Amino acid sequence: MNEPTSLTSALHERIEQTIAQAGGWIGFDRFMALALYEPGLGYYANDSIKFGAMPQSGSDFVTAPEMTPLFGQTVAVQVAEALERTGTREIWEFGAGSGALALQLLGALGERVDRYTIVDLSGSLRARQQLLLAGHADKLHWADALPERFEGVVVGNEVLDAMPVKLLVRLAGQWHERGVAREGEAFAWQDRPTLLRPPVEIEGDHDYLTEIHPQAEAFVHTLGDRLERGAALFFDYGFGESEYYHPQRHMGTVMCHRAHRSDDNPLVEVGLKDITAHVNFTGMALAAQEQMLPDGEGWSVLGYTTQAHFLINCGLLPKMEQKSQAERALAAKLMMEHEMGELFKVLLIAKGEPWEPCGFVQGDRSHRL
């Protein structure tokens, strides 16, 4: 048990130094970036096991591709259509985790993919991915940043939720940015007045905590700048703007995950647990639509729906019929309203001439963004 302690101590010290250098306070987005991505120390940059179906494995949470290979095999239907419609033959996956989704997509798509590039900041996860994907080594490439120009279909499963967010809190009618300071040996919340605001007016005058997502929006902008031809498909938990900033949602959405348990205090066990925030999908769609190029060729929002609708549209149910009862039960969790089916959403944006994508033929909610 010494390693987590030394790792936590080193990360704690690094964050303390950053706070001191900044004059005693840093915004939560800076804290979250250090906690998750500080090289060698942050949660996604250290060697701890993260992804798995059961806590006994030492994992912290399970994602859809780890739950069942039917997820990636079904997503492949939409990816194949996007590759064909955009005339591209490369997939770019961001935050590929254990490599499970890449394995499923490569297996299902076969010769339709010439190259599969994984963009991942984590060296330890890259090693796991290389091991799992050894059978596809001829197509695989890794990158730690986007090139200036590229084309293909971008896939991001639970990647937007791990991008650092700013916390805004309204107290006694005044807006503050919630950041992190030191209190003795511990980290503590500290609020400072700010001119920042949520993208919509929050009705009422009650105290209210929420997030804004400048880094995720900047990521979509960067994709738009550099992707010359192709599409991007995102899976994540979140809402459209009106639901995200509903007056009753006054506690914010930041959550932490460790050993398949969740809590809402990111200031403890730093580096040993995941920190996430729900995605404002309206913000992502707007960031895409703002990215119009001089020739008028920008992003189009082709579809936005629940994960349940998307997977059913792409043919998950017939695939389930051929599986055992145990496998069907796992796949059903991808669609159940109280599991991943309703909270998880799917957004498809594309460059070039729009088309009607198969994953959104029923239940498209683009008009509600």
Image (tube, grey):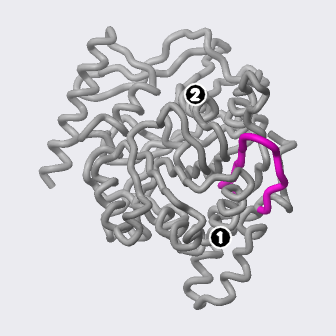
| Residue at x-position 32% and y-position 27% | 187
Which image quarter holds the C terminus? top right
Most foreground residue, 313 or 88: 88
Dot 1: what SS? helix
Residue 197: percent from left, percent from top: 66, 17
Amino acid at pointer 1: Thr
- The residue that label 1 is drawn on is 74
Which image quarter holds the N terminus? bottom left
| Residue at x-position 79% and y-position 24% | 203
| Residue at x-position 61% and y-position 9% | 195
Within-10-Å neighbours for mark 2: few <14, some 14–19, many 20+: some
Residue 253: percent from left, percent from top: 58, 40
Residue 91 lies, with reference to residue 108, above or below; the image says: above
Amino acid at pointer 2: Ala
| Residue at x-position 72% and y-position 40% | 351
Most foreground residue, 306 or 196: 306
Q: Is residue 343 magenta?
A: yes
Which mark sits nearer the N-terminus, 1 or 2?
Answer: 1
Give the magenta-colored segment's residue range: 342-358
Would residue 227 be found to the left or right of residue 135 on screen?
right
Would residue 69 be found to the left or right of residue 350 on screen?
left
Most foreground residue, 163 or 8: 163
Distance from the alpha carbon under mark 1 to that under mark 2 = 29 Å
Most foreground residue, 24 or 298: 298
Residue at the outermost left position: 2
Q: Is residue 210 visible?
A: no
- The residue that label 2 is drawn on is 218
